[in-house]
Image (cartoon, rainbow, N blue to C red):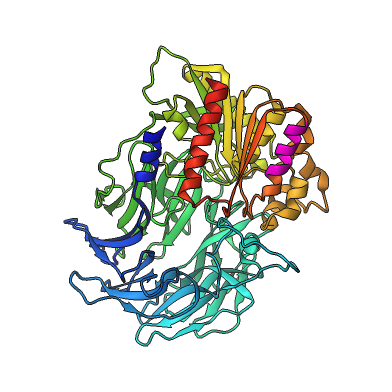
Amino acid sequence: MDDVIRTLFAATTFDQAAISPDGKQVAWVEVAKGGSAIYVSEIGVPKPRRITASGSSENAVAWSPDGKQIAFLSDGASAGQQQLYVANAAAGGSAPRKLTSVKGFLAAPGWSPDGKTIALLFTENAERAAGPLVAEKPQTGVIKEAVTEQRLSLVDVATGKLRQISPADMYVYEYDWSPDGKRFVTTAAHGNGDNNWYIAQIYTIPAAGGEMKSIYKPPIDSQIAVPAWSPDGKSVAFISGIMSDEPAVGGDIFIVPAEGGEAKNITPGMKASASWLTWMSTGTKILFGEEVDGESGVATVDAASGKIETLAHGPEQFTANGWGTAVSLAADGKTAAVVRQSLAHPPEVWAGAIGQWKQISSRNANLKPAWGEAKSIHWQNDGFNLQGWLLYPRNFDAAKKYPMVVLVHGGPSSMVHSIWPGSHSFGVALSAAGNFVFMPNPRGSYGQGEAFTRANVKDFGYGDFRDIMTGVDQALKEAPIDEHRLGITGWSYGGYMTMWAVTQTNRFAAAVAGAGLANFQSYYGENQIDQWMVPFFGATVYDDPQVYAKSSPITFIKKAKTPTLVLVGDSDGECPTPQSYEFWHALKTFGTETELVVYEHEGHMFLDPAHQRDVIERVAAWFDRHLK
């Protein structure tokens, strides 16, 4: 187990790849044990050089329109507090210049079309990073909803003067400059930023500041993301669909007039999920990243006709922003930068003509998989075409039969890619321990179109669970798996599905539920992002408690006989600790073997390397004891 843990912790990862406007250089953010750092290289003759303000946390790269400067964030002036810097992009240029001196959380710098101003998102006096994945701050005394607004702000490049232009009561999630630099389009909502992303609208706001105008309010069962202004300034493209987690975007592509009006879906019936988009310079087509059948793709769609043309497609994941399939596009609309990776190949930066990329970085050249081969498998259920990844045991011997652990992804609006695992990847480590690992994409996932993603609405634990179990049957047909030595695990939605599985079937000999949901009725009043639930359940728990009860594992807890390990962070706002305690307590009450481990000051996503390692070791030991 030590060797796989070393491999999981060894990779340099890449949070971002950004190509210069002329397509000749690429900048990227790489993350290693010492923190994050920014590098730049020519594409023709790769020779990386670092751009730094002497910080240990440096990220959020943005090229100036003329390609001569790079804006970025760095904590070089004060550890733990990033500021905005600008550096000369040319080799041997002057030292980076600090533009801001603020207290709070900064994100997403972006240059104005004339290169005189940099926009960014600023949460003044923020005590933690934005988003519900990080650890929540404990509250005592009189409890009040903590609301700190992330505001759209502008920094003058010449003077460094910062002014906040969006209203103080509005949380801005994303933005895009208008082509003339006079306005912005944003996704935004009033109130609690972590929770109200699910009801965000599309607004425009003058660059001079002032009132925000809503130009699109999505239906209650849809979320919106990635607003992008058309080159002529007359339209805004965006992605809309049912989404369960703020960073994980998927849906169809819509266009709405910039002054407001009816939005048009230009990809209806697409058998894929758009995850990112940008307009081509001609203004007639939109380039987008897509999650499709467990794989990644880059395609264009004609804004008028809806005709889709695939430019690149592959079983590996390629991204440019750390989440979902995306590229960084140069001004010519043909050249792009990406981070490519798979279960067989660790991440590296690539750049060049779309689909004909050449490798630029080589940080992970010496890393080899410490797990087995991954194969994509397909099956049918309830009229759906389904896909999943089957990871073989390391040192696989076809003459032997092996245990298999089902690893259910989070979300549910997400998709399992073939992606190089990181230090949080406890499931993949099971392959190194001599297990098959089956990673299905059941209904509710991205990758098969919006109707597929919506197919679990008001049906959690039923159709999606049947998809998983018929996938298990398919895996048994395709590989030498011992049907009597099956396990199931997952985190978040995967943790919920693990809790659900052990109350529905005795086919599993062991289970590990990470950050799960035991009781949707109590969960509604405990979590920090209850807005996500209404689109999936059709009403609040107070208006329709039964639709929540029928999908709650606790409703069927007397049926649970499977030995179950339960893991959770003590500061998890998405899937709070009481949910895991409630499930563990019930199992213990009815005499089912169980164990509960609560990790100190961890949110929904564990950050402490010692805790990450402990999870890997505990999960492996639990399955080894019960499946071997």
Image side of residue 137 versus residue 350, left or right: right
Along the line of sight, the residue nearer the viewer: 381 or 50: 50
Residue at 49% x, 78% y is 153
Q: Position of residue 164 (x, y in %)?
A: 52, 81
Image-based side of 575 in relation to 23, left or right: right
Highlighted range, magenta: 580-589
Q: Residue furthest top?
A: 399
Give the x, y percent position of residue 122. 51, 74
Q: Is residue 379 left or right of residue 47?
A: right
User: Does residue 496 show up magenta in the picture?
Assistant: no
Q: At 36% across and 23% down in the image, what residue appears?
A: 395
Q: Residue at x 66, y 57 (%)?
A: 529
The quadrant the N terminus occupies is top left
Q: Is residue 382 visible?
A: no
Residue in the foreground of this view, choosing between 244 and 618: 618
Whether residue 213 is situated above or below residue 302 in the rendered picture:
below
Q: Is residue 582 magenta?
A: yes
- Can you say whether 506 is above or below 389 in the image? above
Q: 536 left or right of 313?
A: right
Residue 308 in view here: yes
Task: Give the overall secondary structure of the magenta segment.
Answer: helix
Q: Within the image, what quadrant is residue 155 found in?
A: bottom left
Q: Give how far across and how far down residue 196 sits, in percent.
A: 65, 63
* Total number of numbered discs in the rendering: 0
Q: Of 312 and 116, which appears nearest the observer?
A: 116
Q: Is residue 556 above or below residue 220?
A: above
Residue at x 77%, y 52% (from the top left corner)? 539
Question: Which percent across, then down, holds residue 165?
Answer: 53, 81
